[in-house]
Amino acid sequence: MPLSHLGFCGIDSSAPPSLLLLLSRAFPLIEWGVLFRPDLEGAPRYPPMSYVSGPLLAASRAAGGRMRLAAHLCGERCVELLAGDDSFVAELPALGFGRVQVNATAVNGVDTDPEYLASRAPVLAGIMRCHENLVFIVQRSEETRALWEPLGEMAARGELPNLAMLFDESKGTGARAAGYEPPPGGYPVGYAGGLGPGNLGEVLDEVLALDPKKQVWVDMESGLRGVLDGEDVFDLNKVERCVRACVERGILEDPLK
């Protein structure tokens, strides 16, 4: 498979876990991304913990290992991790999560001064070594270079086998990238920024051609939102259109064939 994960981020209380479970069973490459930010908990895109530890966890257990979940740490959750506090991260495997994304960007309230980010690299590396059962995804952009560059060097030396990186020059703002860098060696790589049902097929054609021998993943968030009865919701119709684009390219297998 050319894709390792097909990431749909921003599931919240508007996304019935029973339907997420059905999609995961049909298409195991799907990874559902959950945004964690305490000051916005309960708002669109940021589900309450009662949703995560209740129906979402129940769906994950019912999937029997076929439901992939990624925790995207935003705001205070990211700041506390970079400060060396891994107490929240330690709870994630029991909630069904296999990957953790560290959104160390200014829009998430993180100090992006290069000197500060550089000082956080060994801290984050230490946490990664303590939680080898989790894959840690670091946003790779010019803004976060001082953080990801030393971590990438450690991974290249074989010191951080659970490091992955996400190319996202939009820094989580949903802007489409002007182009895509080839995936480097040493760690898994994903691509994000302005993806959605209207352009996913085109982007897949582009990123999968960068290095046909290496698996990558794609992740999207803003392009999956919709409005229902005046409310901002996670739109499963848009998810279905993205899945269809993958099926048409032979990336996902049609379960009806």
Image: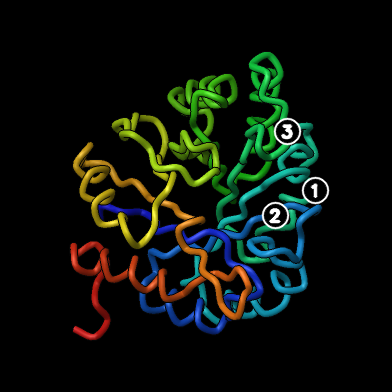
Compare residues 58 and 77 and report the one nearer the observer.
77
Q: Distance between the residues labelled 3 and 2?
A: 15 Å
Residue wearing tag 3? 82
Q: Which amino acid does label 3 sit on?
A: Leu
Q: How crowded is mark 2: few (under 14 residues within 10 Å), some or many (20 or more)?
A: many
Q: Which amino acid does label 1 sit on?
A: Ser
Percent x, y of residue 67: 50, 70
Percent x, y of residue 215: 30, 46
Q: Earlier in the sequence, mark 1 or mark 3?
A: 3
In this rendering, position of residue 115 left or right of residue 100 = right
Residue wearing tag 1? 87
In this rendering, position of residue 32 left or right of residue 251 = right
Percent x, y of residue 22: 45, 82
Q: In which quarter of the image is the C terminus?
A: bottom left
Q: Which residue is drawn at 22% across and 37% down?
A: 210
Q: Nearer the viewer, mark 3 or mark 2?
A: 2
Q: In which quarter of the image is the N terminus?
A: bottom left
Q: Residue at x 30, y 55 (%)?
A: 199
CB under 8 Å between discs 1 and 3: no
Q: How crowded is mark 1: few (under 14 residues within 10 Å), some or many (20 or more)?
A: few
In this rendering, position of residue 71 left or right of residue 39 = left
Q: In the rendered image of this protein, does residue 98 appear above or below residue 180? A: below
Q: Which of marks 2 and 1 is nearer the N terminus?
A: 2
Q: In the rendered image of this protein, does residue 69 appear above or below residue 209? A: below
Q: What element carries label 2?
A: strand
Residue at the limit of the structure toward the top, as seen here:
115
Q: Which residue is drawn at 31% across and 56% down?
A: 200
